[in-house]
Amino acid sequence: MNKIPFPLIYLVYLLVLLYFLIFSFHFSLLVLFIFSLIQLFRRKYFLMLPILILFTIYFSSCLLYDQKNAEHQPNQLSKIEYQPDSIEVNGNRLSFIGTSCGKKYQVYYQLKTEDEQKFFKNLDKNGTLVFTGTLSKPEGARNYNGFNNVKYLASQNIYRQINIESINGIQTNSNFSLQLLRRRAIIHIQKKFPSPCSNYITGLLFGYLGKDFGEMSDLYSSLGIIHLFALSGMHVNFFLDWFRKIFLRLGLTREKIKILQIPFSILYAFLTGLSISVIRALVQKLLPYRKIDNFAMMLILILIFMPKALLTIGGQLTILYAFAMCMTSFKKTKKAQTNVVNYLWSSICLTLVALPLLIFYFHSFQPLSILLTFIFSFIFSTILLPLIIIAFFVSFTGIIIPCNFIFLVLEGLIRAIDKPLHYPFVFGSPNIVQLLLLFIFTGLFIDFYRHTKMRLFFLSGLILIYLTCKYPFLPTITVIDVGQGDSIFLQDRFDKQNILIDTGGKVSFMKYAPWQSAQAKTNAEYTLIPYLQSIGVGKIDHLILTHTDDDHVGDFLKLADKIKISEVLVSPGELSNPVFVSKLTKANLPVHVVKTGDTIPIFNSKLEILSSGYTGKGDNNDSIITYGNFYGSRFLFTGDLEREGEKELINNFPLLKVDVLKAGHHGSKTSSDPDFIERIGPRIALISVGKNNRYGHPNQETLETYNKNKIKVLRTDLYGAIQFYRSSNQWQIRTVK
């Protein structure tokens, strides 16, 4: 094999920079790319230039094709061919990926009957649905650092979602596909094995975890070991090694086995849902190159044949882990103790390399995950994986191995470990510049580890960058988009004091039959909690719950489960509501019953309680009202205060003037009395309201009142999250949309 006239790894490094420059441009990437090109010329790697030009044309073509495809989508459909292994039934909710005329769609449907639910749970044939429904564009991010469904679906070549109103017919067929084989295997496991055993078999063999695994998935995530369920190198090595051993025992030569590995690998990739981590591991296993060249050739092939792979979190993480493993691999020795030490050091290096990307997306990290990964990867690879393979294949004979107790014991152990480690360390999310610096300093720290002075220098740099991620320099006031509800966060500079006013939550008007009950995350898990963690908040100093409506306090318990809370502030009237009191009791947190005149220091000033409620019932007019004069701007937060309460407030504070008003009751006509608005004279009105909400909020009459008084209105349904940040000695305003 002829020697390549330049290091493949340097070419791959430039290709990755080029890739993100084209698909996700940022000025800092351009600076780094230009600097790297200068190094290319200095080292005289001129043969790289035509390759870079070809990839520039290729990546640009992919981007243009993607943009064109996103624009040219049909306005309506009546038929869709479902992808069988994407079918997900969760209570009365059905979702799947479908295709029509070569285009892919994310499809949702609310099941009407229990028989309909059973049909889709057991559907094991390919087919087409005839339906009536609507096509719409997916929703983008509505909060800072929030989940962007548009980008997520686009990475799978999906640009529209379908909401089915009624299914008019189902046309099944006998066509075979590998996706159907995967679907049938999953259904077989769910029928034959009890929970939680079934979840571990589908998860570890086929990369499928059902919605009923939600609680345990949260626990594994909190402990930093959810990646054990991400099918990757461990699983690929296990299955390919056994594949070789079996055929060697049958007398086949190594050359023939290498040929047979190719169709086996393709089959395995389809059976695991074409996971990028599995494909990456299989490609590396089949390539004839070694170590760093093996990694480089794998990544080049991935960039050519799966150009969107690096736009996904899974793709980025699996490539990063593969690179780190190449750079930190160690040779086994005869001494077991030395091997353990080497493995732990390698694990620490892997974690250090991956940590910047992990906190960029997930914002938190469990330091003991290194040790837990070491322990549980051994349990999974040496005990659970062989056990579930035997149990799965034996089940086709009609014999079910009684192993569910093992998984019950395992989950009990996970819960016990989680109790003292429940709250991971929250780092906050780095921006692109910080992310690049973290990668550079991490690499240099590992490279210069044996040089004491350089090691301390790079370690100090890393700590400093991580601190800037966790402790934002600018003070902010953010109206978080929690849909139809309220949640406002006040954060002082360096997070030295923070206050959250309400948590948001869903108001449910319907009672569901047992079969309709779905395993679903709370609204806060999609909105409030990720935002708080992304800005480094691991503890809330003061949580003010203004009144007892679910759209203001419904997600209180979930918030308390995910983020530490030092103190909960409530009104006397809220304690008259037994349901709310039971939540407080369950949370087991310090509770302070506020009274008018109480203050909380923040922003070199104070947040003052103007009212602890007017009715004593915990209802809208019993909302806790807060006011603060922060750096010369006066803010008033009114909860769901209605016109009667507004009159009481003016009677008690006749000279009250406001610059920024958080409108009462989501801009309802029962609030924002014209006389009240005229008396307090706000310049800006903030309305926290759900997009296309059923209540018709904000009311047109209220909007006309604001317009008449020349008040600028900022609404979360139109702008997403709204943030005031202190810069250049004044409050600046920015919105997500």
Image (cartoon, rainbow, N blue to C red):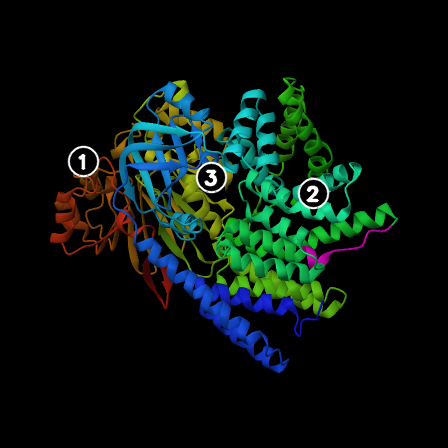
For the residue marked with disc 1, what is the amino acid?
A: Glu
For the residue marked with disc 3, what is the amino acid?
A: Glu
Which residue does the image show at 61% across and 35% down from the upper left?
205
Q: Which mark is residue 240?
A: 2
Q: Is residue 365 magenta?
A: no
Q: Residues within 10 Å of mark 1 (few under 14, many from 20)?
A: some
For the residue marked with disc 2, what is the amino acid?
A: Leu
Rendered location of residue 47, percent (x, y): 59, 76
Disc 3 secondary structure class: loop
**First reached walking from the N terminus: tag 2 or tag 1:** 2
Magenta region: 325-333
Corner quadrant of residue 732: bottom left
Corner quadrant of residue 619: top left
- Residue 558 at least partly seen: yes
CB atoms of marks 2 and 1 within 8 Å: no
Label total for image: 3
Q: Which residue lies under the disc numbered 3?
A: 567
